[in-house]
Image: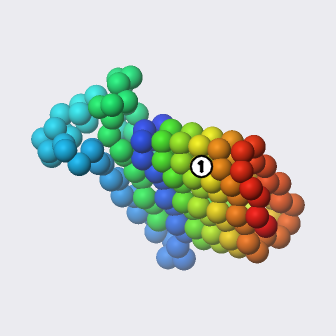
Amino acid sequence: MLRLSKTSGGGISVEGSTDGKAVLEVYIKGNNTLSKTEIEERLQDYTLMVEKEGSNLICVAQSNKSNWRKGLSITFKIKSPRNIDTDLFTSGGCIKLANLHGNLDFRTSGGGLELSNLSGDIHGHTSGGGITAQNIEDFVDLSTSGGGINVSNAQGEIKLRTLLAGLFV
């Protein structure tokens, strides 16, 4: 299982590959006025953890301070085997998933969902963005509180919910 939680201000991208290898990249950005030294100093206020527990990959990027103005954007970009289960959460970024099959759970408070070539038991939610999905199948449950939904080529039991904007299927 791939488990990522509490990324602050950054996104999560997971792409399945056929070579069976897993690769994790972590991107850390400050605003355009921060120097490399200032970014390194602000990182002292973060818990940044990447570890493997059995077959689980756990990645956490969490601020230990409540001042979001001094926050950093920490993004996880993962290449993994195609067959995988996920439990993903980010408080401020987009979630992108591609070429995956499994029990896929993911949610974001402040970004959109970009999904392609997914199958399995799929549950996704965003509070602050739209959802774009193509080539999704099996059981799909997607919802947004703050954007539209655009889905193409969906098969199976599909549940789509939006509170504020349009739904295009």
Q: Quadrant of the C terminus?
A: bottom right
Task: Tell whether 92 sits left or right of 119.
Answer: left
Furthest residue toward top: 66
Task: Tell whether 24 sits left or right of 154.
Answer: left
Does residue 74 lie above or below 19 as drawn? above
Q: Position of residue 99 (x, y in %)?
A: 60, 70
Q: Position of residue 162 (x, y in %)?
A: 75, 48
Task: Tell whether 137 sits left or right of 24.
Answer: right
- The image's colour scheme reads rainbow
Instruction: Sort mark 1 into few (<14), some (14-19) or many (20+) by Cα contacts within 10 Å.
Output: many
Q: Report the residue at 18% width, 34% height from top.
A: 41
- In this view, the residue in front, 69 or 115, is 69
Q: Which residue is mark 1?
A: 129
Helix, strand or loop at mark 1: loop
Furthest residue toward front: 165
Q: Position of residue 153 (x, y in %)?
A: 76, 74
Q: Position of residue 160 (x, y in %)?
A: 79, 54
State whether residue 4 appears in this view. no
Q: Report the residue at 33% width, 53% height from top.
A: 27
Furthest residue toward right: 157
Q: Report the residue at 85% width, 66% height from top.
A: 156
State whether residue 138 appears in this view. yes
Which amino acid is tagged 1?
Gly
- In this view, the residue in front, 56 or 35, is 35
